[in-house]
Amino acid sequence: MSDLSVYGERIVGSEIIKISQEIKKVVSEGKEVINYTIGDFDPSINSIPELLNELIHHYYQDGKTNYPFSSGELSLRESVSAYLSETQMIQYSPSNILVGCGVRPLIYLAYKTLINAGDGIIFPVPSWNNNHYTMLHQGLAQPIECSHENDFFPTVDQVRNTITEDTRMVCICSPQNPTGKTISANVLSDICKLIVDVNAGRDKKIWLLYDQIYSDLSQTDFIHPSILVPEIHPYLVCLDGVSKSLCATGVRVGWIFGPDKFIQKATEVFSHIGAWAAKPEQLAVGEYLKSSDIKSYLVEKKSQYSSIFKSFCDFFETAKNNGYWIDYKKPDGGIYISLFIGYALNHEQEQFCKDLIKENGIGIVPFKYFGSKENDGWFRISIGNVDSANMEYHLEKWKSVLTVLRTRHNSLAF
């Protein structure tokens, strides 16, 4: 008989944090490791906007340190509403927006508000944390293994064939974590139409949970689901925030938006959790979203990331053409690159990553850690700690690593 709950016994801690701890251990021994594992930013390379920094300090100095409004400061929700209208041409009133301490607790909140024990949750794998959130809510996991041929997104036929009477939610993140790819407008439109059609014939409606936290970092045009299929609106819940777009992972301001009934009930659930963003940060972000500074900041960041993506992908393309057993997917946005390393196929994926850290000084994350069982050899590279002015160093490191891996497999060096 366990002293812990079923969740306490079954929960698995963040695999990404675990591998980051492995890197810290090796670094503490005096070895150099380039950390491509965590979806975070080195503030010395990617700092939050200066104006946002000044606004946060201003509101702390102004004494705005008591509890925020439970659904989020009105000024922030008004700014988010206007920002969504201006940048994505979608209309959500401040009352349809709920603010939280980053997107992570709001994803948990969406599950808590929508999912009953035994409800089916469809999600692509690889994808971030849907497997863990499903377990924490006694949901029925209905994962769809996705391949690189489809940019690691499910096809509408795969979704259709996975839906059962138990299905309650379909989860999509675009641009995607961990792949950096964006779901095509046609595929997203077809999935939305499928959900609308299925819902017309059943009492237990299916919701689309759409994580767009990387939307402001799209390298291609970002088209919102409700623009593609307006009829999805009553069954659509979206997540966004500033953690990734403004390099503000530690600022912890995110928001969830959706139809009236969902937001009303989610707000009541959230009142018992209290995972609110700090009031000064909320007020600062609300003011910053109205400034012209955000446009220039995002243009600069997307250009910077695009340059880094190109340098890496050009290098990987050359290595691939030179007979190295690798492949890759050029990102459509966000901060991640998908890399296939065929030399990893002969190894247990976790051990391969540990060996890369200890022996080669590089930390990357296998798709296995994102719930995938059929994409061995595929890894996520995060560029949040990469300085575009220092690309030669990174590419030389990768050249060395690939040379070692290829030599071990009785092939010629680079």
Image: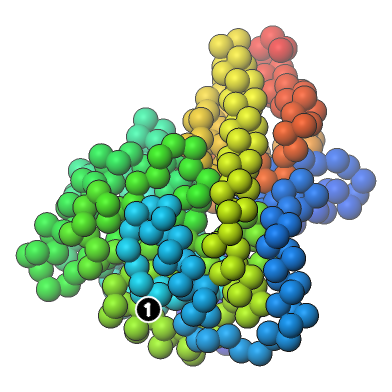
Q: Is residue 310 above or below residue 116?
A: above
Residue pushed farthest left? Answer: 201
Q: From the viewer's perspective, is 38 left or right of 105?
A: right
Q: Is 156 placed above or below 88 here?
A: above
Residue at x-position 62% and y-position 53%: 293
Front residue of this view, candidates 28 and 406 = 28
Q: How many marks?
A: 1
Where residue 340 sits: x, y (%)? 54, 30
Residue lying farthest front?
Answer: 292
For the residue pair 357 and 385, the one nearer the viewer reads as 385
Q: Amino acid at mark 1?
A: Ser
State the image coordinates of residue 154 (x, y, percent, origin top left): 31, 44
Q: Is residue 187 left or right of residue 303?
A: left
Residue 207 percent across, percent down from the top left: 27, 65
Asked if residue 347 can be seen in this view, the reply is: no
Residue 241 at what x, y percent from top left?
52, 62
Residue in the picture at 34% in, 54% down: 89
Residue under the image location 54 percent in, 62 percent down? 290
Q: Would you call the spot at circle 1 few (<14 residues within 10 Å), some (14-19), or many (20 or more)?
A: some
Query: Which residue is rendered at x = 55% and y = 62% of the image?
Result: 289
| In the displayed structure image, the side of residue 345 where residue 20 appears, left or right | right
Q: Does residue 358 lie above or below 309 as drawn?
A: below
- In the depicted view, which residue is nearer to us: 130 or 216? 216
Structure colour scheme: rainbow
Q: Which residue is mark 1?
A: 95
